[in-house]
Amino acid sequence: MSDLLDYTPAVATATEELRRKMANVIPDIEWAVHAPYIAAINALKREKQAVILAHNYMTPEIFHGVADFVGDSLQLARLAAKTDAQLIIQAGVHFMAETSKVLSPDKTVLIPDMEAGCSLAASITGHDVRQLKQAHPGLPVVTYVNTSAEVKAESDVCCTSSNAVAVVEDIAREWGVDTVIMIPDEFLAQNVAKQTTIKLITWKGHCEVHERFTAEDIRGFRAAQPGVIVIAHPECPPSVVAEADFAGSTSGMIDFVAQKQPRRVVLVTECSMSDNVAVEFPKVEFVRPCNLCPHMKRITLPKILHALETMTVEVLVDPVIAARAKKSVERMLAVVPAKARQAA
Ligand code: 13P
Ligand code: SF4
């Protein structure tokens, strides 16, 4: 990994605009550490004609400092398929990088830390899916994108939190069934079940970040901050979603804040979301009880620079598995159009 880089006058000048933009979430003392990496990454990225795709849970210095495109899982999947760049740096967790590789097998996809996993992806294997299909013959399998390529390969269609209801209803109509297997997020499936008449057979996977929120927490936020608007991610338990004013994917949450511009809001999700959105909406007050995703937080500026410098770690997927997984992802992408967000 590169030695600590210096905050030289040239770096300060090159990054001044970004410093001002993020001043309400990154103090100057921290900026001096981030800025040299931001300058180095942006220079090397241009030289190598790479694009950095960053999930909404990346820290602000990544999200606003070096990302070319930002978004939720669905938006990042679409961007990976669309970009002309031959080199993709995935600032997110492993399943996101795998999805990019599956959609663009001829491109080089790098992840800055191979250990950036996900408790949902770790909850289920391809073998588990085969057993589920044997136990429920004739039913389609809808798989959340937070899974390995091997699990996607065993599935009929993927979904994200922003299109799950539409995907479930679409596949049920196509197969002529009233029941669908929806894996691996039990809470997402339970939240979807409240919005459709299709019956769902679920799996016991949970997001280790969102499962920790409780309905009591939400009531506590409201008691402490009268009038606060509560927005929750659908990976939260249904009892939490029931107490919220709105539930949506990470980009759904950002769109809600953008449209409603609430005076005070709490985003019941991963911690970096509030920082990233606060940069864009400085007049909105963000109440910040949140949970950190230890996997997302493995991605740092020094690791992104190291990935670009060394062209590691490359994400590879067995071509046979990739071709089968691609069908499930493309089937999802055909269901609902979603707009991408270019990093500002
Ligand atoms: P989104 O698709 O809403 O970005 O969710 C991905 C994720 O990992 C949330 O925990
Ligand atoms: Fe996985 Fe939860 Fe982290 Fe998202 S927040 S990557 S679902 S562990």
Image: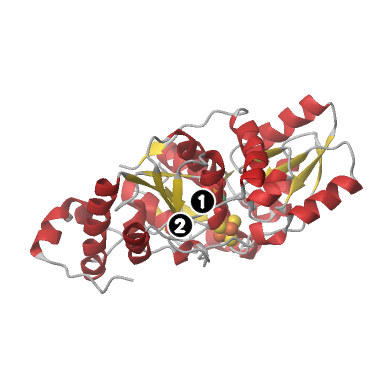
The quadrant the C terminus occupies is top left
Front residue of 161/104: it is 104
Q: Residue at x 65, y 32 (%)?
A: 331
Front residue of 171/213: it is 171
**What is the x, y in percent for residue 84?**
39, 35
The quadrant the N terminus occupies is bottom left
Q: Quadrant of residue 159?
A: top right
Q: Amino acid at mark 2?
A: Ile
Q: Mark 1 — residue? A: 97
**What is the x, y in percent for residue 210?**
60, 59
Q: Spatial distance from mark 1 to mark 2, Cα to Cα?
A: 7 Å
Taking 243 as reference, is 313 left or right?
A: left
Q: At numbered mark 2, what does the secondary structure look like: helix, strand or loop?
A: loop
Q: Amino acid at mark 1?
A: Ala
Q: Are marks 1 and 2 in contact (CB under 8 Å)?
A: yes
Front residue of 201/123: it is 123
Residue 222 got which mark? none
What crowding class fits label 1: few (fewer than 14 Cα within 10 Å), some (14-19), or many (20 or more)?
many
Front residue of 81/221: it is 81
Taking 233 as reference, is 186 left or right?
A: right
Q: Is mark 1 within 8 Å of ligand 2?
A: no
Taking 147 as reference, is 18 left or right?
A: left
**What is the x, y in percent for residue 16?**
16, 55
Q: Visible in this render: residue 220?
A: yes
**What is the x, y in percent for residue 156?**
73, 37
Residue 111 got which mark? 2
